[in-house]
Each structure stands twice: as C-alpha cells, then as structure tokens.
Image (cartoon, rainbow, N blue to C red):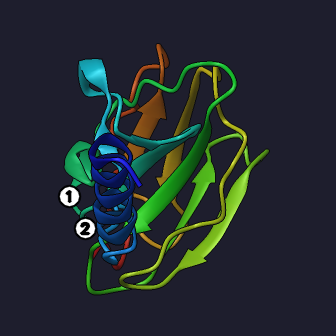
C-alpha cells in the first residue's frame, strides 16, 4: 500500500469514528425571525406561560406562515385547554410540561383562548388579540 493510500484510509477511519461518537445536533426548536415563535421544520411552537391575560402565550400574536403547523407547549404548572375563539380548532387539555398535537393553523388569522381560564387570550398572524373577558367567578 502506498503512503498516500494509507493516509487516505487512515483519514477515512478517523472520520468514521468521529461520526459514530454519539453526538447529535440539538433537537430543540430554533427561534423564527420576527417573533413568530419557535420553529422546528414546519412546526411553530407557542408557549403557554400561565394565566396572565394577553401575556399568557409567547409569542402573542404569533406569526404562522401558510403551510406551517402549530404546537402549544405548556410550561405552566396547571393544565390548559386551548381552542380557537370560533371553536373550529380545539387543542384539548395540555398538561404541565406537555405539548398539543400539531395543528394546521398556518396562514390563519384567528384569535384563541384557554377554555379553562378564559382570561388567557392570544392570536395568530394579523388577527387582533382580544381583551380578556371580565372576571365573573373563578379567574385564576
């Protein structure tokens, strides 16, 4: 075997060994430009932060281009139930630390809320985020 060929084989072996080192790129979403939420592939993540009116969701409003899906991720300590205000899409109950299934909301101009905590409000794209309704009982 020539020296040049041996060097190539040695370099290829070193490269292959490094490829199998177990390192993988981070799987957490990377932020989208323009405050549109976090994205991973064709999914935009909207974080549920807690019961805090228009600041309950991050980002709010969220930019969700056509063709993208939305996932609601609950970082609060209680379960939330997110749905569009017109009730056409219901994400269901989202436990603390969990995320909703991907929802086909890309390109929609819509407002949404937490069915359990109606003071939690948000919107997608150019829809205005409505003011939370007045408290008429338990509002926590």
What's the residue at 32%, 29% (across, down)?
Answer: 32
Taking the spot 54% from the left edge, 40% from the top edge, the residue there is: 41
Q: Nearer the viewer, mark 2 or mark 1?
A: 2
View extreme (front): residue: 1
Determine whether, in the image, residue 103 is placed left or right of residue 14. right
Question: Residue 99: image x %, image y %?
Answer: 50, 70
Residue 64 or residue 79, whichever sits in front: 64
CB within 8 Å, label 2 to label 1: yes
x and y percent of residue 61 in the render?
35, 29
Displayed quadrant of residue 81: bottom right
- Position of residue 74 relative to residue 78, above or below, is above
Q: Specify the label residue 52 is tagged with.
A: 1
Residue 63 horizontal/vertical position (percent)? 43, 24
Give the residue furthest to the top: 126
Q: Residues within 10 Å of mark 2 (few under 14, many from 20)?
A: some
Q: In the displayed structure, does residue 132 sit left or right of residue 92?
A: left
- Residue under pointer 2: 50
Viewer-proximal residue among 43 and 74 = 43
Could you tell me which residue is drawn at 26 percent across and 43 percent down? 54
Element at label 2: loop
> Is residue 111 in view from this perspective?
yes
Residue 72: where, in percent of width, then height? 48, 58
Is residue 53 positioned above or below 69 on the image? below
């Amino acid at each position: 075997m020539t020296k040049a060929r041996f060097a190539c084989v040695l370099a290829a072996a070193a490269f292959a060994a490094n490829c199998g080192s177990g390192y993988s790129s981070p799987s957490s979403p990377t932020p989208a430009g323009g405050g549109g939420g976090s994205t991973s592939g064709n999914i935009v993540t909207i974080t549920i932060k807690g019961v805090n009116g228009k600041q309950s969701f991050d980002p709010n409003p969220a930019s969700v281009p056509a063709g993208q899906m939305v996932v609601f991720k609950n970082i609060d300590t209680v379960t939330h139930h997110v749905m569009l205000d017109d009730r056409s899409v219901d994400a269901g109950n989202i436990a603390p630390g969990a995320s909703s299934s991907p929802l086909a909301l890309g390109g929609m101009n819509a407002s949404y809320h937490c069915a359990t905590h109606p003071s939690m409000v948000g919107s997608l794209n150019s829809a205005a985020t409505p003011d939370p309704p007045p408290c008429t009982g338990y509002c926590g």
